[in-house]
Image (cartoon, rainbow, N blue to C red):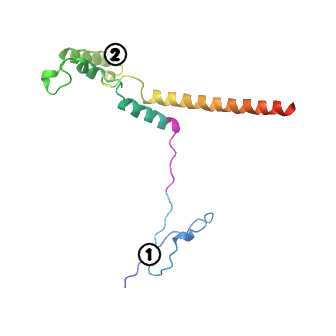
């Protein structure tokens, strides 16, 4: 019979041993471990990501300038160079060249219009802070109201 010896580091003195890791069967090999520390995601970041996902799935989501003219054209956004709107391509490339030459964000015409991730994060943070302030104000108002009722 093959026997396996598993050596584990002794638990820290501050943590009691886990009794659930013992097996009544002496022949059974039981491997125990601790779950990794879970990270907490900032709720404002999560709210901003959800809003971005909702906007991308929306029928009225903003489209990049390069796609906007193609979507409005009678030919649509087909495949190949036949459906390419050369006037729009020239406009977008010209805008990108001017922005690059002046040191601005030249990729902006290619990105969807609307707020970016950081702007969405700031909006979500502001909304959360406003909700917490309103909640605190209501609690204070209710506490004052109860104190006034008890005096009468």
Q: Where 51 sits versus 29, above or below?
A: above
Seen at 52% across and 45% down, the residue is 40
Q: Is residue 106 left or right of residue 142?
A: left
Dot 2 alpha-carbon crowd within 10 angstroms: few under 14, some 14 to 19, many 20 or more = few
Q: Give the label on residue 149, or none.
A: none
Identity of the residue drawn at 31% across and 19% down: 100
Residue 40, magenta (yes or no): yes
Residue 17 picture location, percent across and down: 58, 69
Residue under the image location 36 percent in, 29 percent down: 58
Nearest the viewer among 128 and 104 is: 128
Write the start and end of the magenta stretch as one range.
36-45
Give percent across and percent down for residue 7. Answer: 47, 73
Say which residue appears at 13% left-offset and 23% top-offset: 81
The quarter of the picture where the N terminus appears is bottom left
To which residue does mark 2 refer?
102
Q: Quadrant of residue 88?
A: top left
Number of other residues with Cα within 10 Å of mark 1, as a class: few under 14, some 14 to 19, many 20 or more: few
Closer to us: 61 or 120: 61
Say left or right for 75 vs 99: left
Secondary-structure class at tag 2:
loop
Residue 48, image x and y in percent?
46, 33
What secondary structure predominates along the stretch shown in magenta?
A: loop
The vertical placement of 118 against 6, above or below, is above
For numbered disc 1, what is the local secondary structure?
A: loop
Spatial CA span between label 1 and label 2? 68 Å
Mark 1, mark 2: which one is toward the viewer? 1
Q: Residue furthest right?
A: 152
Residue highlighted by disc 1: 29
Query: Which numbered disc flags the more N-terminal residue, 1 or 2?
Result: 1
């Amino acid at each position: 019979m093959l026997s396996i010896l598993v050596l584990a580091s002794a638990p820290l003195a501050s943590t009691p041993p886990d009794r659930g890791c013992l097996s009544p069967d002496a022949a059974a090999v039981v491997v125990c471990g601790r779950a990794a520390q879970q990270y907490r995601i900032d709720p404002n970041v999560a709210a901003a990501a959800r809003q971005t996902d909702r906007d991308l799935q929306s029928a009225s989501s903003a489209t990049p300038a390069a796609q906007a003219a193609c979507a409005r054209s009678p030919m649509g956004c087909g495949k190949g160079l036949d459906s390419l709107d050369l006037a729009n391509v020239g406009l977008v490339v010209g805008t990108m060249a001017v922005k690059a030459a002046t040191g601005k964000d030249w990729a902006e015409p290619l990105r969807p219009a609307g707020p970016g991730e950081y702007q969405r994060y700031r909006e979500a943070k502001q909304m959360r802070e406003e909700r917490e302030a309103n909640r605190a104000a209501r609690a204070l108002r209710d506490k004052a109201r109860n104190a006034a009722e008890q005096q009468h």
